[in-house]
Amino acid sequence: MTTAGTRKKRSERTIDEYLLSEQQLEDMYYHMLLARRLNERMLALNRQGRAAFVIAGVGQEAAQVGAAMALKLGTDYLAPYYRDLGMNLVFGMTAREAMLNLLAKRDDPNSYGRQMPSHWGNTERRIVTQSSVVATQLLHATGIGLGAKMRKDPLVVLTCCGEGSTSRGDFHEALNFSAIHRLPVIFYVQNNGYAISMRNEKEMPVPNVADRARAYNMNSAMVDGMDAIAVYQTVRPAVDQARNGGGPFLIEAKCYRLWPHSSDDDDSRYRPKKELEEWTKKDPVSSFRTRVETDGIFPKADLDEIEERVAEEVREATQWALMQPDPEPEDALGYVYKEL
Amino acid sequence: MAEMRMRDALREALREEMLRDETIFLMGEDIGLYGGSYAVTKGLLEEFGEARVIDTPIAESGIVGAGIGAAMGGLHPMVELMTINFSFLALDQIVNSAAKLHHMSNGQIHVPMVIRMASGGGSQLAATHSHSLEGMYAHFPGLKVVCPSNAADAKGLLKRAFRDQNTVIFIEHTANYAIKGEVPDDPDFLIEFGVANILREGTDVTIVGYGGSVHQATRAAALLEEQEEISAEVIDLRTLQPLDMDTVIASVKKTNRCVIVEDAWRFGGFGGELASQVMERAFDWLDAPVARVACKDVPLPYNRNLEFAALPSEEDVVDAVLGMFKE
Ligand SMILES: Cc1ncc(C[n+]2csc(CCOP(=O)(O)OP(=O)(O)O)c2C)c(N)n1
Ligand SMILES: [Mg+2]
């Protein structure tokens, strides 16, 4: 299968202005675009009646890919939430696997079709699966961080949730605990403007989620989550600091949910059209393309080639995954207890 | 009378009760502008305003706890918990406060509150989103537990819940929301708690269900009649606390057989309570051991094949009944 950067040799030298190399910039674009095109195909499959449920990260690709690229693959842990397709792709999930997960197929490496789609988990890649109950994974990340500290293992855990989920006790308990013990955990909140139908003002009395860090004497940062490069440049130093014993970080990426909450939602009931139009202009994927093209990093032909490669990859993965077998009903009772 | 879906009947009940009693207000996630995840509260924000229809942050323990306080202060809150799965997060407030304050305060305090929640499996929502906890709530003294199976009952029972002075756990099976039925429009239409409903009369076997499982029971009864010439009586419990065992016992004494159907896990399920009460009160009338049809003891999987394999079906009910007639 094709993966990022297999076509053209790119320079690994860091470009000062970006803090990223050409190779990394290409990977960044590739993963954002792959996440977008996969989500688009997933929704199409839902509308055709072939996928029962889709929950997507459209509008949050830059926030996800930029942050995940700041981590060390094979070392660092990811405790994601249900929109984090882009992060999982950076962590090594393939287009085929994403489709197996959506379709709850037997060979879905996340869960054999047991979990809802988008509840990713793959211990080989250090991605931990989670409950559908929001914010619970923040505490699991705290515990992984605690273990790492006890074993003096220089790993970092990045865990995600939406801004609405920060109203929950688990969020506050996780921040408090990890700040007391100075754990290597990045709490990465993707503020996409809505918690289903509810806007920020109904969810919290402070203008920014990041403001809450002060109450826990914790480092914090805010970043334009529509800009993958800015995200990388914000998350990378936080990860380095956490790895070196600097304690946890709360980072808020301001982004926008360009789609309804899920395939079951009708956002016309609560979202002003005008607002959606404004944010669509800031689309994180196309604005990245415009920037690297305008800055002369990649010629148009190269970017077109990536587009084609991604489209082909998604098409192939979809056709292939649809043909894969379902789980066996006789396996329904598996894994309730760990066998001794 | 008007024909409507259960979700509309529930809305009617809320509207009528809010018009009747100004102390009633609603709190929950996405219940205002959005109209509720299952569209039960649609239009109520527009009609009653933000003071009485409150969109809350995602904080289940918080909204139940605040509801308890509001009830102490003389209001009658209705808290919607979106789904029963999120009620685990509020369990301490429900169990250690709402259920116990009356007793612990020696009657000084009581908590008149209705907590509504959608429940049940079967819609491919997977392990953490598919719980059936009616029996668990019925286990806690101090709570009333209501689980309507149809539109008219939903209205009558929800209206009755607001006439109570205790915390009422009101559980709505997601598969029931779209079921249509004739619903009385009398604003004083109430269904008393603790009165089971005989949905179908029969002579050979008593099938007991509640909430969602009533429908497997009635479909199984139809199959038994058509294919096996077995006449099944179907009882819908309607409320688990208080529990109308008299109706069940009278039926079992007539049919001499009893099958209990529930969506919850078999192990430690409410069916066990029912079976032991039948045994205590009607042992000598039984021609066969009481049978239970329930969910397999596994977290419910997402994949349709796997979920189907785990959930109880009407075929399972038919098999359980036929098993009683085999020598
Ligand atoms: C504890 C809990 N309450 C309610 C829900 C239902 N629910 C699922 S997603 C969601 C909104 C979450 O909003 P946010 O945290 O902003 O994340 P977003 O979906 O916007 O990315 C809600 C209320 C849930 N899963 N868990
Ligand atoms: Mg959000």
Image: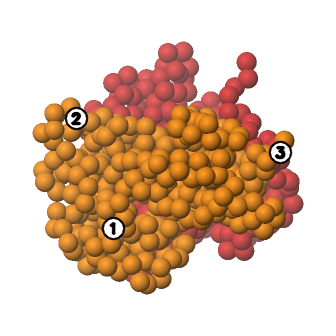
Chain colours: A red, B orange
B165 and B324: which is toward the camera? B324
Q: In which quarter of the image is the N terminus of chain B?
A: bottom left
Number of numbered tags placed on the structure image: 3
Q: How far apart are the alpha carbons under marks 2 and 1?
A: 27 Å
Q: Is residue B67 left or right of residue A22?
A: left
| Vertical side of A329 occupied by A153: above or below | above
Q: In this view, does B253 lie to the left or right of A185?
A: right
Identify the residue position indicated by label 3 in the image: B326
Q: Which chain carries label 1?
A: B
Q: What element carries label 1?
A: loop
Mark 2 close to ligand 1, CB under 8 Å: no
Mark 1 close to ligand 1, CB under 8 Å: no
The location of residue A144, given as percent across then percent down, is: 52, 27
Q: Which image quarter: residue A272?
A: bottom left
Q: Is residue B28 visible?
A: no
The location of residue A183, given as percent across then percent down, is: 43, 26
Q: What element carries label 3?
A: loop
Identify the residue position indicated by label 1 in the image: B190
What amino acid is found at the position of numbered circle 2 in the picture?
Answer: His
Residue sitting at 33 percent across and 31 percent down? A176
What amino acid is found at the position of numbered circle 3 in the picture?
Answer: Lys
Same chain letter for marks 3 and 1 = yes
A104 and B113: which is toward the camera? B113
Residue sitting at 27 percent across and 36 percent down? B100
Same chain letter for marks 2 and 1 = yes
Residue sitting at 52 percent across and 21 percent down? A147
Tell me the number on the disc at residue B103: 2
